[in-house]
Amino acid sequence: MGYMNHDEPYSEDYIRDILSSVKTIAMVGASPDKTKFSYGVLRVLHETGYDIIPVNPRPGLEEIRGLAVYPSLAKIDRQVDMVDVFRRPEDLPGIAQEAIDIGAKVLWGQIGVVNHEAARLAEDAGMKVVMNRCPKIELFRPFWTPKLHLGI
């Protein structure tokens, strides 16, 4: 399988297919701090109807917005469709490997989180990859029609 050029814009169809097919999203680097960008993304994705699993190894951090926090991807006790990453780009290859190990289908690096080695690892394992984008922003683009018929 060929590799995507992640320096090019992603097609609307590619992003739409991902956001309409995933249900469970593990958020690596989720923060309980309401002033952090990651908190706002977690809130909106959760309110949109996704099953959000915050991942943060901080001792004593047990929940964010009422959602149980897991110390690592490996400790999550259910199937994860997408891993959304709020971490430094150099952390992405390790997270990609953890995402592969738990059978996730999508690796999504937030804005500023780009690592081509990580993308290649994930793509070699058959995962879809998005980098340097924010799912919260993508959800509000005009092409998006939510297919999650869930009450908020």
Image (cartoon, rainbow, N blue to C red):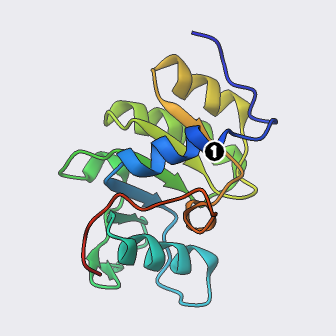
Q: Position of residue 115 (x, y in %)?
A: 71, 38
Please identify the residue farthest to the bottom as the structure is shown.
34
Q: Relative to residue 42, is residue 125 depicted above or below?
A: above
Residue at the image position 46 percent from the left and 83 percent from the top: 32
Q: Relative to residue 47, is residue 7 depicted above or below?
A: above
Q: Position of residue 63 (x, y in %)?
A: 31, 80
Please identify the residue farthest to the left as the structure is shown.
77
Residue at the image position 47 percent from the left and 32 percent from the top: 97
Instruction: Classify residue 91 as left or right of residue 95.
Output: right
Q: How many labels does the image show?
A: 1
- Pick the residue in front: 67 or 69: 67
Type of amino acid at the residue the image marks with label 1: Glu
- Pick the residue in front: 10 or 66: 10
Instruction: Classify residue 90 as left or right of residue 33.
Output: right
User: Which image quarter is the C terminus in?
Assistant: bottom left
- The answer to which quarter of the image holds residue 58 is bottom left
Q: Relative to residue 87, is residue 101 depicted above or below?
A: above
- The answer to which quarter of the image holds residue 25 is bottom left
Residue at the image position 25 percent from the left and 70 percent from the top: 150
- Pick the residue in front: 13 or 41: 13
Q: Where is residue 16 in the image (x, y as percent from the top left)?
A: 52, 47
Residue at the image position 33 percent from the left and 80 percent from the top: 60
Q: Relative to residue 42, is residue 117 depicted above or below?
A: above
Give the structural element (helix, strand or loop) at label 1.
Answer: helix
User: Which image quarter is the N terminus in?
Assistant: top right
Q: Position of residue 137 (x, y in %)?
A: 63, 67
The crowding category of the residue bearing disc 1, from other C-alpha atoms within 10 Å (few below 14, some 14 to 19, many at least 20), is: few
Q: Name the residue under label 1.
A: 12
